[in-house]
Image (cartoon, rainbow, N blue to C red):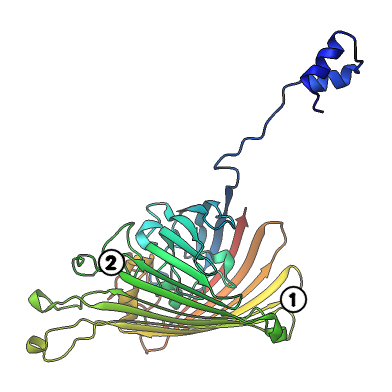
Amino acid sequence: MKLEKWTIGLAAVGLVTLSPAVLAQATAPQLVPVQTALSATTISGYVDTSAVWNPGSGNANPAPFAFNRGKQDGFNVDVADLKIAKAADEEKWSAGYVIELNYGPDATAIDGGAGGSAPLRQAYVDLKTPLGNGIDWQLGRWDALLGFESSDAMKNPNWTHTYGKTFEPTEEDGLLGSYAFNSSINFQAGVADTVATGPLNARSIAGAPAPIESKKAFVTMLTLTAPDSWGSFKGSTLNAGFDIGQGYTSTGLTGAAIKPHNRSEVYVGATINTPVKDLTFGASWDSIEHAELADAAVFGAVADSGYFQAFAGYASYKLTDKLTISGRAEYADGLGLGALTGAGVGTATPNFDKVLDFTGTVQYDLWANVISRLEIRWDHAADGTDPFGANSPAPTATAGGTKKNDVLVAANVIYKF
């Protein structure tokens, strides 16, 4: 209760009568709310754990999809994630920020996922500018645009990742702009230091020649969302993205003949809602080209340093509020598939060029804030080689395997907060 000072003074000399409770409340110190930069800050994150069994003997050469190496036949801490953020408000000129830290073998921070040796995954300033419908800018390090799957396994229908996700960049350092033309059309475009994820503030990617002064990568993503008028298909999305930037050198090309060249990445993906309640389909296509522009006078032709492509299909059906089943099929091929994968994504490198993989996942949300899943995955080398298995202690791109097939059974438990 707020009383004027003169009223309290009159009560003190007996001209006005106030109850002891009212007088005590009126004379108590008043707490005034203090607005600070932390008042709208949120803290979130998750802890991702797993237990993996690979039936049969010999697991020195596991299937080389992202984050698979080192998890065979045992219990694992996959990644711990902590995100601190303040969203920009709806004012014409407003700002926010994001800081996200990753720890563990699945960390995508700094080194592109090679063991999570440094924790900084995202760190950017979020700026709003009142141009047209409003342009949102992110300046710093932000999650890369390409791909059907997130680096956060809890956001995906399956725990393990596709080969498409394995080859995609995970983060970019640069300036990204986002513009919503309306509720159905959103376009993102940015300029980044590299076309693939490398160390923080890196000017070139692993295996590339010395960086060219001022050369940058360009990234884009167009998202189309089905409106409410589409009935059962409303909310379905179609994504198309294109990245281009400095690429790799070709094996065996040395000296003055090596010239700067580009690595280009194309992605198309869709999520489709259906008339069947809680049944969703998805599809994705990834393609990467990076060609060395060799000197024709020396080599007689342009030497192709590598390519990669992957096709994946998804299906997910929520049977009950707690139970969801999901399936995925993928075909991937590339020139030296295992060698291209390499240690940059924390995997072994069996040398093969074509692979089929099928994944089935059952998710049952028994505990609050917990995702619990059982998953079975089968990878098959479709080029006639035997890249998997064996017990050699240090697998390399040329290390011999003993099996065409690699089978994984995993239990995954994630707590999100």
The residue closer to the viewer here, 209 or 385, is 209
* Rendered location of residue 136, percent (x, y): 49, 63
* Rendered location of residue 216, percent (x, y): 29, 68
Q: Of the residues shown, which amino acid type is indicated by label 2? A: Ile
Q: Residues within 10 Å of mark 1 (few under 14, many from 20)?
A: few
The answer to which image quadrant residue 64 occupies is bottom left
Residue that label 1 marks: 319
Give the side of residue 259 with respect to residue 202, left or right.
left
Mark number displayed over residue 73: none
Q: Evaluate whether residue 9 shows in this view.
A: yes
- Secondary structure under the numbered disc 1 in the rendered image: loop
Which residue is rendered at x = 70% and y = 64% of the image?
365
Q: Residue furthest bottom?
A: 300
Q: Of the residues shown, which amino acid type is indicated by label 1? A: Leu
Which residue is rendered at x = 74% and y = 67% of the image?
322
The residue closer to the viewer here, 160 or 316, is 316
Q: Evaluate whether residue 63 shows in this view.
A: no
Q: Residues within 10 Å of mark 2 (few under 14, many from 20)?
A: many
Which residue is rendered at x = 54% and y = 51% of the image?
85
Residue that label 2 marks: 205
The image shows a total of numbered marks equal to 2
